[in-house]
Image: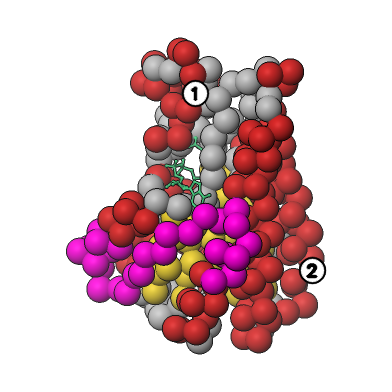
Amino acid sequence: MLLQDQVVIITGAGAGMGRSMALYFAREGAKIAVVDINVNTAEETVRIIEEKTGSEAVAFGVDVSKAQSVKKLVQTVGERTGRIDIVINCAGLPQAFTPIEDLEEEEWDRLLNVNTKSVFLTAKYAVPYMKKQKKGSILNIASIASERARPGLNAYCASKGAVVVLTKALALELAPYGIRVNAINPGPTNTEMLGKFVPEQDAEPERQKQDIFISSIPLGKLIEPEDIAEAALYLCSKYAEKITGTIFNVDGGRGI
Ligand SMILES: NC(=O)c1ccc[n+]([C@@H]2O[C@H](COP(=O)([O-])OP(=O)(O)OC[C@H]3O[C@@H](n4cnc5c(N)ncnc54)[C@H](O)[C@@H]3O)[C@@H](O)[C@H]2O)c1
């Protein structure tokens, strides 16, 4: 198995891509800390892992934008297992189409705190474990919106652009310690989130998926959470030992 007994923290693992990554990584023998602000969905992911794999998983209800909560999460996992091998920052919030003049300061802060500050916080608390081990892997789920913006998604695009640059900065900073830092830019992916990028009044998720998103993907199909999980598995495995600072587009060509 690719990740036998490795300790993996996955945020946003109560749904969508995070849940899919948790299952793929557990199938490869990893022990998973399933983190989500919604502890019920995190527990559901743990049940799925227990049913489908022989691996250990524990649910944590954590708001990744809160320093004290992230600190406690990382310390709990570190104390229980003695190590932290992989951190995947997948928790994120969408932004409904909002003209910049209507964007409230609170909404800007909320998006930047959950989508960007969380990447700083998990690194701040997990990197000391990885430095001690002289090995570790951090994977950030950014977005193809960091390369190809969409109108009205101003704060969301900014939050993901910052994740991309932070990924590169940390890759350089942590390379001497054997810690790799990479990001995936998903294209439009078939999860609950996809229907939430449109103005709230015309939210018709299925039509939006078809009209706006599928038509913008050269390969003509939405990305599935499993596509992201397979790329994540590669980037966190021994097969990517020489890969750091990479921004890996899993986007059906949307970024071209
Ligand atoms: N779906 C897409 O089209 C798409 C495209 C590009 C990038 N992304 C990014 O991929 C990641 C996963 O998205 P998804 O499509 O699986 O969405 P999703 O909504 O299905 O899952 C996101 C999860 O994050 C959790 N979460 C939200 N705020 C949190 C917080 N403060 N603390 C802890 N957990 C929190 C949610 O409860 C949810 O379970 C996000 O970062 C998103 O921005 C999504």
Camera-side residue of 235 and 9? 9
- Queried whether the magenta region covers residue 70, the answer comes back as yes
The answer as to whether callout 1 falls within 8 Å of ligand 1 is yes
The quarter of the picture where residue 136 lies is: bottom right
Q: Amino acid at mark 2?
A: Glu
| Disc 1 residue crowd, few under 14, some 14–19, many 20+, Cα 10 Å | many
Q: Quadrant of the C terminus?
A: top right
Q: Is residue 36 visible?
A: yes
Q: Are marks 2 and 1 in contact (CB under 8 Å)?
A: no
Q: Residue at x 52, y 55 (%)?
A: 63
Farthest residue toward the top?
202
Does dot 1 land on a helix, a strand or a loop? helix
Which dot marks residue 173? 2
Give the image quarter of residue 245: bottom right
Image height of 113 relative to 147, above or below: below
Percent of width and height locating residue 143: 60, 40
- In the rendered image of this protein, does residue 59 appear above or below residue 14? below
Front in this rendered view, residue 237 or 84: 84
Can you give x and y, in whole percent of width and height, for residue 37 in the image?
A: 45, 52
Does mark 2 have its CB less than 8 Å from ligand 1? no
Q: 68 above or below 45? A: below
Q: Residues within 10 Å of mark 2 (few under 14, many from 20)?
A: few
Q: Residue at x 59, y 70 (%)?
A: 71
Q: Residue at x 43, y 48 (%)?
A: 17
Task: Tell me the magenta residue range.
Answer: 45-72
Type of the residue with mark 1: Phe
From the image, tell me which residue sits under label 1: 213
Q: Nearer the viewer, residue 49 or 248?
A: 49
User: What percent of the width, then of the height, locates residue 158?
Assistant: 72, 37
Secondary element at image label 2: helix
